[in-house]
Amino acid sequence: MTTSTGTDPGARSRSARFVLRSAALLLCAAAPAALPVPAAADTPADRSARSSEAYEPARDARPVTGATTGEGPLLPPGTYTDSIAAGERKTYRIRLDGTSNAYVSAVLAPPPGTRVGASEGIRISLKSPVGVLCSDSTDITFDGSVARPVADYATRRIGPGRECQKAGVYEYTVEGIGTGTAGEESGAWDRPTELRFMLEPGLRNGESIPAPVGSYPTDSSALPSGTARTATGGSGFNDAPATGHGVWQDELAPGETRFYRIPVDWGQQLVLGAALAGRGSGDGLRMTVFNPARGFVQSADAARPGRALSLATAPVAFGNRTSGRNEIGAMRFSGWHFVRLTRDGDDGGGGTGAARMTLRVAVTGEARPAPPYAGDPVAAGFGVTAADRGDARTGLTARESDRRDLLRSVAFTAFGLGTALLAGLVGWTVLLRRSLARRATPWS
């Protein structure tokens, strides 16, 4: 009787097929994750809840308490949260070199539904080590009864014949102005603030500041038409969705404010149009543009029925900072520009429902090279990248864009690992078959 103790060829074949199928399943599991991740749809419940959303601070914002007496905390460049009360004055300190332009901004963000007065707000100032104002103090007020985030900045600009050109520790001050609205106890208020300190590199040695732009078109003929894409506006600067050239659609309830962000590069001009659907197109809308450092650029209001909003900024140019006109001087660097849209608390007809809002965005002109900076402006928060232009076609917020990029990175890594595993297992199976074939000799 002959007995074979060699490996069963059928078993070897089944083992190999099992390994290959397992590897293929791993690869298939990784593949779907490599596909683009769509943004979540904006449901009616989402839109209904938005009107009660409070201002969303930056993810990396650090809490800080400004000094009401004595020296304030020394702040490195970054974003911070604090609060300010009516009549209160808080100070902070920042350290500046003798070559960089500095921007210190403040956002006053009362909770939605808060009663505010038209003259309430904050005052921002920046002083040199010897107490000289580096720029005019900036008063920011609500200019109405609707509670909305308001913002602006104070600056230290490097240039011949200007104050505050030396290195040292400067004093950054935020003051609550206005005494409160009628009916509030003692007319007092205490509201959250978001502070930001940015440094823009100076020009390389020997480079002079060019002249600001001259005349530029201010009509709305460049505004696009076509099918609108959905963009759910943010509560402020940090969760504003990216909205590039095109037509966008959202909903606004009475008293609601939404923010959107648009990349505008050197040499480019931003043209905007906005309107509410229904009776009185544009009725009760207020539109404001801010630059990348949260500085006020210009605004447009449409308080009369039948009138839509539109505005056109100056083209972005480094030399604009020397202009005596704020709407030109604020368009001084490329980067994400922000649009704030507010609907008045009364829609004029006693209604309280949300209305469809259409935002038309035109970014005109060819992008030009950046000026000869001595440092990296993009790393400092100024500039437009290819990724920014891509994001502007999506309607995603910065957080959603980061999440998408992270998921894609993880997916591609998993796909690569799955491919490598499959190739390794195929090679292992081939070698195993050859080895077993050489060893499988029958004996009696």
Image (cartoon, rainbow, N blue to C red):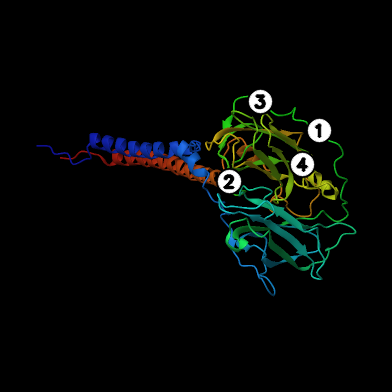
Q: Which element is circle 4 on?
A: loop
Measured as percent of width and height from the top left, residue 190 is found at: 60, 61
Residue type (three-letter) at the residue carrying disc 3? Ser
Picture residue at 27% right of the left edge, 42% below the top: 439
Q: Quadrant of the C terminus?
A: top left
Question: Foreground: 14 or 277?
Answer: 277
Which residue is denoted by mark 4 in the rendering?
A: 266
Picture residue at 43% right of the left edge, 41% below the top: 418
| Horizontal side, residue 173 vs residue 439: left or right | right
Q: CA distance from mark 2 to mark 1?
A: 31 Å
In this rendering, the answer to whether 27 lies above or below 326 is above
Measured as percent of width and height from the top left, residue 93 is found at: 70, 68
Q: Which element is circle 3 on?
A: loop
Residue type (three-letter) at the residue carrying disc 4? Trp
Q: Nearer the viewer, mark 3 or mark 4?
A: 3
Q: CA distance from mark 3 to mark 2?
A: 26 Å
Measured as percent of width and height from the top left, residue 369 is found at: 78, 42
Which residue is denoted by mark 1 in the rendering?
A: 217
Which residue is denoted by mark 3 in the rendering?
A: 225
Contact check, label 3 and label 1, Cβ < 8 Å: no
Measured as percent of width and height from the top left, residue 82 is found at: 60, 62
Of mark 4 and mark 1, the one earlier in the sequence is 1
Of mark 4 and mark 2, the one earlier in the sequence is 4
The image quadrant of residue 302 is: top right
Q: CA distance from mark 4 to mark 1?
A: 16 Å
Q: Nearer the viewer, mark 2 or mark 1?
A: 1
Q: Residue furthest bottom?
A: 70
